[in-house]
Image (cartoon, grey):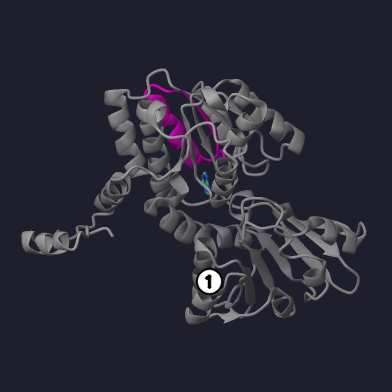
Amino acid sequence: MPVLRSIRERFERERPLEGVKVAACLHVTAETAGLMRALAAGGADTALCSANPLTTQDEVAAALVDDRVPVQAARGEDVEAYARHVRALAGWGPDVTLDDGADLLVLLHDRGGADDVLGGAEETTTGLLRLRRLEAEGRLACPVIAVNESRTERTFNDRYGTGQSALDGILRATNLMLAGHTLVLLGYGATGKGIAQRARGAGAAVIVCEVDPLRALEARMDGYEVMPALAAAERGDLFVTATGSRSVLRREHLERMKDGAVLANAGHFDVEIDLADLRELAGGRVREVLPLVEQYDIGDRRLNLLASGRVVNLAAGEGHPPAVMDMSFANLALAVEHLALHGAELERRVLDVPKGIDEEIARLKLESLGVAIDTLTPDQREYLDSWGQTFSE
Ligand code: ADE
């Protein structure tokens, strides 16, 4: 993670986070450990809990505890333990919060304490939806930096990160052959686009289901079959949800699926596949056929659910590769610095990542990849400036 490393080295020299209490509710992975170490190098007091009960890498949690970073997380913790851990971080009284799904900052709003937070940074679409709701209700008590919407996060994390890691999680859990099979993708946002692209590259036929006409049109023009989920239900061998919505695959779809169909969720919460409907259809006839693969016998057919419907790239794999998290966590590290230095003056709104951070991260990443690029000639600069346009627009 060369970009994060260069930030960490600067933090070591400048110590911009001296004494700042940073609480992170993030997936506890090796990449997250890299972020926590960069923040500590900047002088921050840090504490970490997981953003999901099934995504903690226990060996990483143990290594961080050895480094004297308090970690409240264990892989497979139940929902009660998960909630207790998030509560513990909220009770610590953080100055800055980092979230992957907004559980920590929303809790601080619900139980009190958000007024004392200098600011938060959020790295998922789902988390931003929740925080924008608080803003719309006039309840947002601190500034929030929408790290998820920086270009170096969204393009690379969602498209390339989830595109690869969701399929990686599915393949690790099932050893399924993609070529010759039909993958039904529900949701053609940035994440869905990545999954569709990678699945097609591996030889799968891809069907896209969408509710947004523009995205559906884009999927069609990208060369995928587009149809309603009810029609796709009969065609798919593998179903992947990536919508951020709930009950996307429910009884009416489950009843139409082929024997042996595989169901996986790539969205943040475990609500996209309707687990209550699946359980009801199976009436208790459920068995674990492989680690993280539960087979539901729904009469004349069996459906295979991966990772209990939780986010499959982290629950059945290791999440996005470090090469992608490098940029995501560089954004988070710089957002923390910005909040520590300027949080008190910022508006209590959901804010863009400060200008210049995106370009800086992309420049460092290119450098680390040994890729050089052109610069505008003075003549070109003058021409573009005359239209009020900059090179990154
Ligand atoms: N989200 C997706 N992949 C991740 C990873 N490797 N570490 C932390 N959060 C993630």
Q: Is there any visible trace of residue 376 in the rendered image?
A: no
Question: x, y (%) of residue 370?
Answer: 24, 54
Is residue 43 one of those drawn in magenta? Answer: yes
Vertical comparison of 212 with 247: above or below: below
Q: Nearer the viewer, residue 236 or 226?
A: 226
Vertical comparison of 169 with 140: above or below: below
Quarter of the figure with the C terminus = bottom left
**Amino acid type at image mark 1:** Arg
Q: Nearer the viewer, residue 56 or 106?
A: 106
Vertical comparison of 180 with 148: above or below: below
Q: Is there any visible trace of residue 183 in the rendered image?
A: yes
Quarter of the figure with the N terminus = top left
**Residue picked out by circle 1:** 215
Q: How many marks?
A: 1
In this image, 382 relative to 68: left or right? left
Question: x, y (%) of residue 67?
Answer: 49, 23
- Toward the left, the furthest residue is 379
When asked about the image quadrant of residue 343, the answer is top left
In this image, 235 relative to 288: left or right? left
Label 1 secondary element: helix
Q: What stretch of residues is rendered in magenta?
A: 21-44
